[in-house]
Image (spheres, coloured by chain):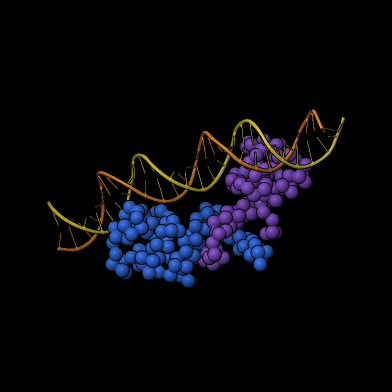
Chain colours: A blue, B purple, C orange, D yellow
DNA sequence: AATTCATTTGACAATGATAGTCAAATCAAT
DNA sequence: ATTGATTTGACTATCATTGTCAAATGAATT
């Protein structure tokens, strides 16, 4: 998967590719145009529900978009942290440990 | 670093190792005993500031504890997500991409 | 078994972050 | 200059987090 674009950029590119207006897409999401504008410019975060609806409206792979959304949420948590990279690695290990335990 | 213990477990073990009471440690943190009790049993999350203070009080490696704390925060974001593991990997890649751009 | 002290539990309040609306400002194309 | 799309910013509503407090439970000890 591409990792060099923000969720907002992806959404905007694909909305424009489909020739849809902010207004039109926002209406389908049942939110104000202003919010969608902010989401596309990464000034606000979308909710998971909005991401799912958006992937339907814009015909994007839903799982890819959820991964995109989740990874952005993760990055947001550690964006100002010096130890962020280390924390990510440890989180992966712990994740493995947890999954292994479950099985 | 060990990845098989929760922050709470580490805190409790080390508090007891030092023979300190919840009451005593909570007082130093300037919070109610109840909260510390909940933190140690992973019923509540500590704040970063509390983790830092706790690592001083219990003489634990501060950076390790912050990594522990951050990784738990990350895991919390994806705990109920099927795509969590993928999201973690993508987050790492994006992190690398961002850091590389900065340099 | 009554007392005492530590810890836990749960209801509630205060605070802070997130999501949203709305109206006005800006931008782009006629 | 007008029109329609987008952006901006001030403001509100909603929700999650962090905390207090009092009562309940647990674990010795006399």
Query: Which one is nearer the viewer's eye here, B94 or B101?
Result: B94
Considering every residue shown, the one lying at the far bottom of the view is A1
Q: Quadrant of the C terminus of chain A?
A: bottom right
Query: Along the line of sight, which residue is nearer the eye, A102 or D5?
Result: A102
Please tell me which residue is depicted at 29% across the width and 60% down the height of the picture: A24
Query: Could you tell me which residue is drawn at 36 percent across and 65 percent down?
Result: A57
The answer to which quarter of the image holds residue A40 is bottom left
Q: Position of residue B2 (x, y in %)?
A: 70, 59
Give the quadrant of residue A5: bottom left
Q: In this view, does B81 lie to the left or right of A10?
A: right
Q: Position of residue B40 (x, y in %)?
A: 67, 47
> Residue A60, how many percent across, how many down?
40, 69
**How many numbered circles are shown?**
0
Give above or below for A11 relative to C10. Answer: below
Q: Is A18 placed left or right of B56 in the picture?
A: left
Residue drawn at the location 63% of the way across and 48% of the way down: B43
On the question of residue A13 being in view, the answer is no
Looking at the image, is A39 positioned above or below residue B41? below
Answer with left or right where residue A90 lies relative to residue B21. left
Regarding residue A101, the answer to whether it shows in the image is: yes
Q: Residue B100 location, x and y as percent?
A: 50, 64
- Against A54, residue B62 (above or below) is above
Residue at 33% in and 59% down = A28
């Amino acid at each position: 998967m591409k990792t060099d674009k923000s969720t907002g950029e992806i959404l905007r590119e694909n909305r424009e590719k489909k020739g849809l207006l902010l207004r039109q897409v926002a209406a389908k999401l049942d939110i104000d145009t202003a919010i969608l504008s902010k989401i596309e410019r990464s000034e606000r975060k979308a909710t998971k529900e909005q991401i799912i609806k958006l992937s339907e409206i814009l015909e994007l792979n839903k799982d890819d978009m959820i991964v995109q959304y989740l990874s952005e949420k993760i990055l947001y948590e550690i964006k100002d942290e010096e130890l962020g990279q280390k924390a990510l690695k440890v989180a992966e290990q712990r994740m493995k440990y947890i999954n292994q335990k479950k099985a």
